[in-house]
Image (tube, rainbow, N blue to C red):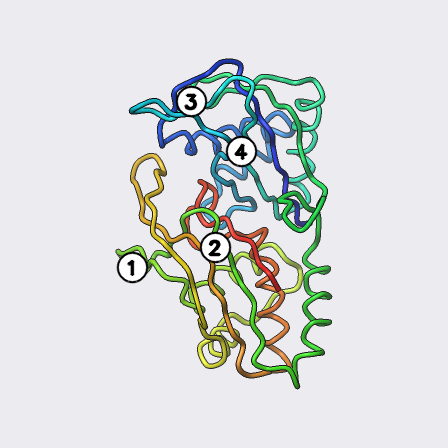
Amino acid sequence: MLASLVIHLQPLETYEITSSINRFLQPLFYEILKKGDSAIASACHESSSIKPFTISPLFGNFGRTSTKRLVVKGFGYWFRCTILTQDVFDSFAKAIFPMSAEKKQVLLDGKKFIVQNVELEKRNRFSWGNLSSFGALWDEAQETAKSLKSGLPFSFVLRFVSPTTFRRGDINYLFPDPSLVFRSYIRKWNAFSERTFDESSLIEYVNSSLVVSSYRLKTEIFDVGDVALQGFKGSCRFSLLKFQKVNTPIVLALAKFAFYAGTGQKTTMGMGMTRSSI
């Protein structure tokens, strides 16, 4: 199970907000999940392992005063969450779809919003809602790989929509190094998919065969509550230089998985939102 849900909200009034508004989306996610199944919400919250979901920042048409950003009454806002397991999806869906149908109120940093709509289907190539599965991504990747033996180098693009960063020891690393990018994907894939891959073999292949061929990136500060982190945003083109029967389809599957997995650290707090073009 792989799900990407876009939750559309509308504020009841015009409110001033701060850069920390995004940190209230994770508690809202857990609150909705708890309405669906409190045991699953507790287990998910208390687990110290990789989380089976991601959360985007809040998007929309923000107003401004000389010093503050505003959410404006009558305007629409949205955030996206992705879910990587069936039980979490079932529990979240059990709560969020009735909330949308009944236009229930939710709170973000004490501000009242109405749940206007939940988007799950892929309407066009720009949509953020979608349903898929690990098996479907793997099948698509295998089909793509069949055509690559005589078509290398092969390129694909990852677009980092929210600030993205990697933890390397005590520092935040601000560049989409292929080994860091794909290590983050394979670890999340292996945590939740029945089909798992050899991480060390994949990273060895990535180091020898996958390069950054171009990029347009900028850095931006992202407030995650207790700290503000620098992250990179923008697009990066990766080129695959060598075909390998085992690992080439894995790279392609993981590149597709980026849409659901997010990239790097703090993906449950709004960082690392990613779209792939492959």
In the rendered structure, the answer to whether residue 152 lies left or right of residue 163 reads: right
In this rendering, the answer to whether 133 lies above or below 145 is above
Q: How far is disc 1 from disc 4 in space, using C-alphas?
A: 29 Å
Query: From what the image shows, is residue 179 above or below residue 58?
Result: below
* Disc 4 residue type (three-letter): Ser
Q: Nearer the viewer, mark 4 or mark 2?
A: 2
Q: Are marks 3 and 1 in contact (CB under 8 Å)?
A: no
Q: Which residue is labeled 1 in the image?
A: 169
| Residue that numbered label 3 is attached to | 109
Q: Which residue is at the front of the view, 4 or 65? A: 65
Callout 2: 10 Å neighbours few (<14), some, many (20+)? Answer: many
Q: Mark 4 and mark 3 in contact (Cβ < 8 Å)?
A: no
**How far from the left and from the top, in percent, is residue 85?**
64, 47
The number of discs equals 4
Residue 107 image point, x, y percent: 50, 20
| Type of amino acid at the residue the image marks with label 1 | Gly
Q: Which residue is mark 2?
A: 263
Image coordinates for residue 41, horizontal then vertical, percent: 56, 33
Q: In this image, 35 relative to 179: left or right?
A: right
Residue that protrudes farthest toward the top in the picture: 13
Identify which residue is drawn at 66% across, 18% down.
Answer: 103
Q: CA distance from mark 3 to mark 2?
A: 26 Å
How busy is the neighbourhood of tag 1: few (under 14 within 10 Å), some, or many (20 plus)? few
Answer with the quarter of the image where residue 277 lies: bottom right
